[in-house]
Image: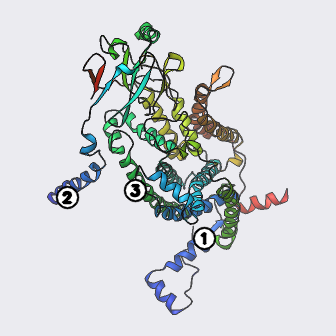
Amino acid sequence: MAAGAVGAVGVGGAVWPLINQLNPDASVLALSSVEFDLASLTEGQSVTIKWRGQPVFASHRTAKQIAEAKAVPLSELRDPESDEDRTKPGHEQYLIQIGICTHLGCIPNGPDQGDFDGWLCPCHGSQYDSAGRIRKGPAPKNLVIPPYKFTSDTKIQIG
Amino acid sequence: MTEHSGSYTPSNGLEKWLDDRLPIIRFSKEHLMDFPTPKNLNYWWTFGGILAIMLVIQIVTGIVLAMHFTPQASMAFDSVELIKRDVNGGRIIQAVHSTGASMFFLAVYIHIFRGLFFGSYKAPREILWMLGVLILLLMMATAFFGYVLPWGQMSYWAATVITNIFAAIPVVGDPLLQLLRGGFAVDNPTLNRFFSLHYLLPFIIAAVVVLHIWALHVPGNNNPVGVDVKSSRDTVPFHPYYTMKDLFGIIVFLIPFAWIVFFAPDILGHTDNYVMANPLVTPPEIVPEWYFLPFYAILRAIDFNLLFINSKLLGVMFFGASILILFFVPWLDRSKVRSGTFRPQFKWFYWLFVINFLLLMWYGAQPPAQVVLMNFTVADVSKLSVLYYFAYFIIILPLLSVFETPRPLPASISESVLGAART
């Protein structure tokens, strides 16, 4: 009994490192942050920034796109979030989001793609609107907003 | 079924000495040569032998390719190109391996559909069938890991999409995703571990194949009429009758295989995989290899939430269930009659299932918004195919077992063979 218990602990102790080696190591985990100046973006333009190996979309939205995003009643949304929830006050022309489809991780094409003037995922046809909210297709959630803050009027720091 | 009295008599002192210690010659003679096999097996039965050869071809070419491949994110793509261009004969060896994967799946699908038609999953062959499903799962994993190794755009995005499937699991999904990838995105650690696993799994497959054949040799082969072997008049020895028949099947199968390898080695691949992996650009259209298309279509068809289950998790559940359901077929089809030949209604549903499977394969290759009929898109009509796929197993097979009146069975295999000769 005691031998069995010690054996079980021993096996567990030996197996865990063998599994844990699969996890990202400290050099990958070291949280990096990225700075970006949005002033270079003209209205309607969007760029992709690399943060932690993942693409981040920074978009300067047109007045039409903002109006469309605001006009949608929340009850029509699969993952209800208002346009204000997804932007920073005073900077609502800028939309910063992780450019990874919440379905299976492809990078959606956009902006101004699909039926909702937003992003269209090429893999399984998910469509996001001009605020990056899921509107159609298999994805369950809106595009993720990364942690970021404005360090000046147009400069942002992601992470 | 086998007579263990044995037909083997050691012919000299050395064989006698070996036979008393490790009766490997006896075993080979009984199981590879004299094994009593129903005399009416048709060419659909040669695919077992074809599959064994395919596994050997994949392992041998794979070991050779591993001698030249570099599992490092910045070098993997170039190393595969070097294999194709510089390594002596590498162009052919690489093409045999990549085309071989497709031919392997073609053969395994025919093998599975043969089993589904002739009721090869029914008692006493349930374990044999389940080991086969396990081999299919292992093959899928191996093919996926292998597809990632050339590190082209399709490789990279296949790895991204498939690892993301695990993120759909509630609670543990995200940590599990990082565990599988070894980072926040698919990268060098992912490539490394996939190479390691791609090398390992074929040997696991080989081990399960041994169990599969063991489970086959306990009850013996099923056969096209599905009645049990009743006397030695119903069987012939495996060698030379089926070694020769299988060999002929293998040669015929290798002809189109060789044609593709020599004249169109890239015909089954996707052009985007000639572009090196780029984590910041998804190709305009992602399509898996043809052999995954039906399951990919099932994954993609589920774009709606059901109760508290979101569309992503639901799609993944259907995707997994579409293969796991095969494990339960022996208990879903309760009909006493094995062979579909004697089941008048079953036949129709079976062939509809085959057509439906091919239809799913086609849907998987089309963009979801593609209009198929009137205003209906692939995303709409593929739901019907998913419905039929599952209904066949869960509703149709159990109901047929109760309501269908099968045609009378021949008294024995010999009678069926002679009867066919008369007409």
Mark 3 or mark 1, whichever is nearer to me: 3
Distance, label 2 to label 3, CA atoms, is 29 Å
Q: Is residue B422 visible?
A: yes
Disc 3 + disc 1, Cβ < 8 Å = no
Q: Residue at x 69, y 41 (%)?
A: B351
In the depicted view, which residue is nearer to us: B160 or B320?
A: B160
Q: Is residue B223 visible?
A: no
Q: Amino acid at mark 1?
A: Phe
Q: x and y percent of residue B181 in the render?
A: 36, 44
Q: Which residue is mark 1?
A: B35
Identify whether B49 is placed above or below B226: below
Q: Which residue is mark 3?
A: B196
Q: x and y percent of residue B325 in the render?
A: 51, 42
In the depicted view, which residue is nearer to us: B108 or A117?
A: A117
Q: Which residue is mark 2?
A: A7
Q: Amino acid at mark 3?
A: Ser
The crowding category of the residue bearing disc 2, from other C-alpha atoms within 10 Å (few below 14, some 14 to 19, many at least 20), is few
Q: x and y percent of residue A42 in the render?
A: 42, 17
Identify whether B28 is placed above or below A2: below
- Secondary structure, mark 3, is helix
Identify whether B350 is placed above or below B240: above
